[in-house]
Amino acid sequence: MADSTSPRRPGGIGTTPAVVRRLPLPATQPPYDDEPAGAARQPDGTGTTAGTGDPPRRSSTRAAPPATDGALALSPAVSRGTGELPDPRRWVAKLTQAALEGIHGHRSLQQLVRWTDEPVHQALTRRAQAVRVRSVVRPRIRAVRLCRVEAAIAESAAVVQLGTRTLAVAVRLEAVHGRWLCTAFEPVETGPARLSR
């Protein structure tokens, strides 16, 4: 028997549950290799960081946007017209980052179901199952080069650093129902690691 003066057990009757709040984390990653050295980055409230606000460069090679450490920060709220699709360069960088994190065990590949077609998602799942040793280093997007084949189709190549290895990833995006859908995702290892296999 418990008397009224004894302290209550955690989780017992009469206790109020703690309130859990989710707050965005500040940007802590250094700038990418091809970003200007003094470029300031500002949080956008989702835990990722916004671009530098610099005017667009004439070259089609641009710095990749910052990595996402939480859920894939791709906005599903886009209009139906292809003229108002999100920037495909940022989309490729975020999708590539998330897919490689999924392959190497840092996130669930289920987060990518909405953003990839069925064959691409199955290929990513097979690659993740084939990876025997999970990487302790997260992949980092170094650069993204993009070509707009049509208004509703974009093809790109991303350069990714994974520890001491460098990967090239080919990605094809197609506009489907007002959003980008990844219809091809092909990582290719470069350098001595590939030659030794």
Image (cartoon, rainbow, N blue to C red):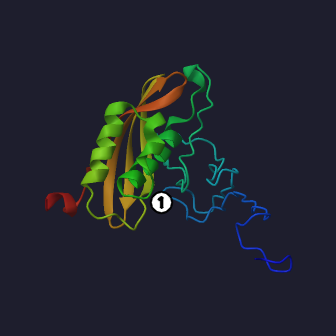
Extreme front residue here? 1
Which residue sits at x=86%, y=80%?
5
Q: Quadrant of residue 76?
A: top right
Quadrant (top left, top right, bottom left, bottom right) of the N terminus:
bottom right
Above or below residue 108? Residue 28 is below
- Of 135 and 93, which appears nearest the observer? 135
The percent coordinates of residue 38 (x first, y second) are 63, 62
Which residue sits at x=70%, y=66%?
11
The residue at which mark 1 appears reads as 33
Extreme bottom residue here? 6
The percent coordinates of residue 149 (x first, y second) are 40, 25
The percent coordinates of residue 35 (x first, y second) are 54, 56
Tell whether 160 sits left or right of 36: left
Q: Is residue 189 visible?
A: no
Above or below residue 134? Residue 112 is above
Above or below residue 95? Residue 137 is below
Number of dots carrying numbers: 1
Which residue sits at x=69%, y=50%?
44
Q: Quadrant of residue 42?
A: bottom right
For label 1, the SS is loop
Q: Answer few, some or many: residues within 10 Å of disc 1's Cα (few below 14, many 20 plus, some between 14 and 19).
A: few
Q: Is residue 86 visible?
A: yes
Tell whether 165 sits left or right of 76: left
What amino acid is found at the position of numbered circle 1 in the picture? Answer: Asp
Quadrant (top left, top right, bottom left, bottom right) of the C terminus:
bottom left
Extreme right residue here? 5
- Of 43 and 136, which appears nearest the observer? 136
Tell whether 143 sits left or right of 168: right
The percent coordinates of residue 48 (x first, y second) are 61, 53
Which residue sits at x=31%, y=51%?
128
